[in-house]
Amino acid sequence: MTIVSDVHALLEKLGVARDAYTGGDLVVRTPITGEEIARVPTISADAVDGVIARAADAFVAWRRVPAPRRGELVRILGNVLRDNKEALGRLVSFEAGKVLSEGLGEVQEMIDICDFAVGLSRQLYGLTIQSERPEHRLIEQWHPAGVVGIISAFNFPVAVWSWNAALALVCGDPCIWKPSEKTPLTALATHALFDEAVRQFGADAPAGLSALIIGDGAIGQKLVDDKRVPVISATGSTRMGRIVGERVARRFGRSILELGGNNASIVTPSADLDLTLRAVAFGAMGTAGQRCTTLRRLIVHESVYDALVGKLKQVYANISVGCPVSSDALVGPLIDEAAFTAMQDSLKAAKAAGGAVHGGERVDVNGAGSFYVRPALVEMPAQTGPVVEETFAPILYVLKYTDLDQAIALQNDVPQGLSSSIFGTNLLEVEQFLSAAGSDCGIANVNIGPSGAEIGGAFGGEKETGGGRESGSDAWRGYMRRQTNTINYGRTLPLAQGVKFDVG
């Protein structure tokens, strides 16, 4: 069996029609070897208008379906994903280059958010508010917002769709998904599984409830600019988010932006160094450093610096780098040559800024078409140059600090504000880190790294990370519109604030 035949067998098993991945104009390559594995047809910009029109029609019907019934569709989807977890997880590994446990873990995340959304379908709560007027009451309701556009990135090619779609569907919203051009196959497979869930669900699901549009940036722009799509959820670079956010705001739409992350962990004198070592290794090297929550800066107290960094150098020198589907390697390939070039450019800039670079070299695993690297550990004299930028690769910059105020200031002194963590057992230091004067990130962890969020909490960050929230907690409100109602159940008309307006 070859990678191509393995991928095609998985697509067939997952219900994807052969003409959806052969003979198209978009060439798909696996980062495992760099070889071509499929050719996917793309949609024209003109055809996107019809997709949006069908989704808008679907909204008229879907918003009238009771929310618990909408949750039943998501429950079925979760079960279909359970039945196909291994196949879809393997496909994620083939297309995105993740090690198998991470590919399977991504599908488990989809299953988990479906479970969460099913319960949510009976808990889209509003409020009852006390009125200042006699025989009046105030209530707050939440109604479906409308069509939701989902623009996802290559590094989590299916989980991010599920974070949005599972919530949007129970909230009463149809979805249109534009996946990364680097990972369209997993999107095709996921959508085929969604179609199977709809088949089992029955006629309550209108045509156009979920659509998949594969194409370039012009296709995404059509979605972003259309006023029939009131909510756009976009995951990607800060540069992309600035464009999307501005264009959506121009038409008074709503953006949920999940953008860059230059995440840091602070290691205090009281930290358990063995625990810290394991957490740092996964946080910095998992998914070959291609997570938005990847640990990119390690800020270590001078009293434990030598002990921890010495052990980290050994881990970095010996970490297994290899094929993610045919070995037990912990680090797979970078997505493509552009990612490799960006990593090398950042390492050169770090050296020029006085950094000591350990690792970072290319590793020959599957020939010239693939880009495997040894993760890089870079000891920096100061937080300058590439340290304040996000490079989507396994580079960990290490800095030294003397007091916690200094460490927190270093952590916060970057444009991004996604995830952060602290390692320590001193309660005062931990609580300071979690306080209003501590981490300025949307996620702040204790004694774990910044990566590996659970679906129960709202996911997202501040500053140039975009400010959006997806997944758990009350992130569902982003897919609904708020309505305040005043009900007068009396025979008189008292006005608020004591205003008098007597006409009779």
Image (cartoon, rainbow, N blue to C red):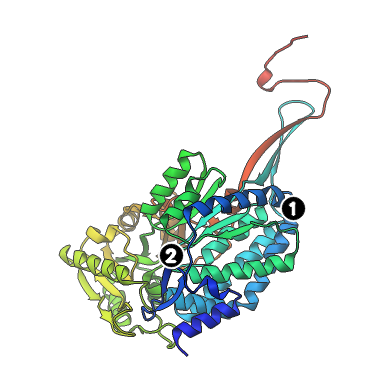
Which element carries disc 2, helix, strand or loop? Answer: loop
Q: Looking at the picture, how far across and down is residue 37, in whole percent? A: 44, 78
In the rendered structure, the answer to whether residue 164 lies left or right of residue 428 reads: right
Please report the residue visible at 62 percent of the width from the left and 48 percent of the height from the top.
Answer: 56
Q: Are there few (<14), some (14-19), or many (20+) residues within 10 Å of tag 1?
A: some
Residue type, label 1: Val
Q: Which residue is disc 2 drawn over?
A: 181
Q: Which residue is disc 1 drawn over?
A: 65
In the rendered structure, the answer to whether residue 455 lies left or right of residue 3 reads: right
Q: Are there few (<14), some (14-19), or many (20+) residues within 10 Å of tag 2?
A: some
The C terminus appears in which quarter of the rendering? top right
Residue type, label 2: Glu
Which element carries disc 1, helix, strand or loop? Answer: loop
In depth, the one of 39 and 365 nearer the eye is 39
User: How many marks do you count on the picture?
Assistant: 2
Please report the residue visible at 67 percent of the width from the left and 70 percent of the height from the top.
Answer: 196
Is 251 above or below relative to 493? Answer: below
Q: Determine which quarter of the picture holds residue 143.
A: top right
Depth check, mark 2 against mark 1: the one in front is: 2
Residue 437 appearing in the image: no
